[in-house]
Image (cartoon, rainbow, N blue to C red):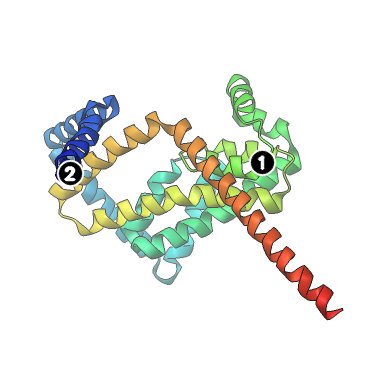
């Protein structure tokens, strides 16, 4: 018992020391320090940006009853035309409407915009994409995205990708009834996090907003560094869940079969 009591703190410390020896831990810590310093040096400019955010919020809310529709229309159009990043609008939704409603409006607008983009691409084909995407860039993404599983497409959209990839997804042979829900589910994860970030930005004082964005920037750098690995882990988890579901379905079917035989 004494040996176990002595070894337990050593075991805990060994695990903690492993974390401190990880290169990614120090990269994230350095990134947090660098971004915090930048935010501190440009604090006046950032406060000005927050003030502009208040102006944008007042402008959207100025539509009154139609404000949610105005935002959703803008979000859907940015998928189709791509004049600004969708994650920016996701943050703005939480800032304007709150975390819950903002995330909901973003997901609804995503469903409309993504559905239209995928349908248009499937209707008009590759020549449409060649009009507004460089041929070399299009070929690079086509080599990366030779995927026949809707699950893989959904995992791709968990992390930010260019909006023209929505059109590229429409060129796949996957049925739309399976492809569109998978992509919406994947992209919605990032939109919810963006809505949370925007909602907290509206509630926190400016100095804490800078701390929050410094922390999020460090975490984002870490996630971007391990993007492929995280997608792989998510894919393996989904596959394991699918196998477990099929196993339970077979068990339920096997349990029902003797009952039917007994009744007959």
Q: Residues within 10 Å of mark 1 (few under 14, many from 20)?
A: some
Q: Residue at x 74, y 70 (%)?
A: 256
Q: Is residue 208 left or right of residue 241?
A: left
What residue would you read off at disc 2?
Answer: 211
Q: Residues within 10 Å of mark 2 (few under 14, many from 20)?
A: some
Residue 115 visible at all: no
Q: Is residue 257 left or right of residue 161?
A: right
> Which secondary structure, mark 1?
loop
Question: x, y (%) of residue 130?
Answer: 66, 28
Question: x, y (%) of residue 18?
Answer: 25, 30
Q: 9 or 63: which is nearer to us?
A: 9
> Which secondary structure, mark 2?
helix
Q: Residue at x 68, y 41 (%)?
A: 170
- Mark 2 or 1 closer to N-term? 1
Question: x, y (%) of residue 221?
Answer: 33, 32
Q: Residue at x 23, y 41 (%)?
A: 215
What residue would you read off at disc 1?
Answer: 149
Contact check, label 2 and label 1, Cβ < 8 Å = no
Single out the residue that lies furthest toward the right.
264
Q: 240 or 207: which is nearer to us?
A: 240
Give the numbered dot on residue 90: none
Residue 230 visible at all: yes
Rendered-image quadrant of the C terminus: bottom right
Q: Residue at x 61, y 53 (%)?
A: 181
Give the number of marks: 2
- Residue 141, quarter of the rendered image: top right
The residues bearing labels 2 and 1 have C-alpha atoms spaced at a distance of 40 Å
Question: x, y (%) of residue 41?
Answer: 12, 33
């Amino acid at each position: 018992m004494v040996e176990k009591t002595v070894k337990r703190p050593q075991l805990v410390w060994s695990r903690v020391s492993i974390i401190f020896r990880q290169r990614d831990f120090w990269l994230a810590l350095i990134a947090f320090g660098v971004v915090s310093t930048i935010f501190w040096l440009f604090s006046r400019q950032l406060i000005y940006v927050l003030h502009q955010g208040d102006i944008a919020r007042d402008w959207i809310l100025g539509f009154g009853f139609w404000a949610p529709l105005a935002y959703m229309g803008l979000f859907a159009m940015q998928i189709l035309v791509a004049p600004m990043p969708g994650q920016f609008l996701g943050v703005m939704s939480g800032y304007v409407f709150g975390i819950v409603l903002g995330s909901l409006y973003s997901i609804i607008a995503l469903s409309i915009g993504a559905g239209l983009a995928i349908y248009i691409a499937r209707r008009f084909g590759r020549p449409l994409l060649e009009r507004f995407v460089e041929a070399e860039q299009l070929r690079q993404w086509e080599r990366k995205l030779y995927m026949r599983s809707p699950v893989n497409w959904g995992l791709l959209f968990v992390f930010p990708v260019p909006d023209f990839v929505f059109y590229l997804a429409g060129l796949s042979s996957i049925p739309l009834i399976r492809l569109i829900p998978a992509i919406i589910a994947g992209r919605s994860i990032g939109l919810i996090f963006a809505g949370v970030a925007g909602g907290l930005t509206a509630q926190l004082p400016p100095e804490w907003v800078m701390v929050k964005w410094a922390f999020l920037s460090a975490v984002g750098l870490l996630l971007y560094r391990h993007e492929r690995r995280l997608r792989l882990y998510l894919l393996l988890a989904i596959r394991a869940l699918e196998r477990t579901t099929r196993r339970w379905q077979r068990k339920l079917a096997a349990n029902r079969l003797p009952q039917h035989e007994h009744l007959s």
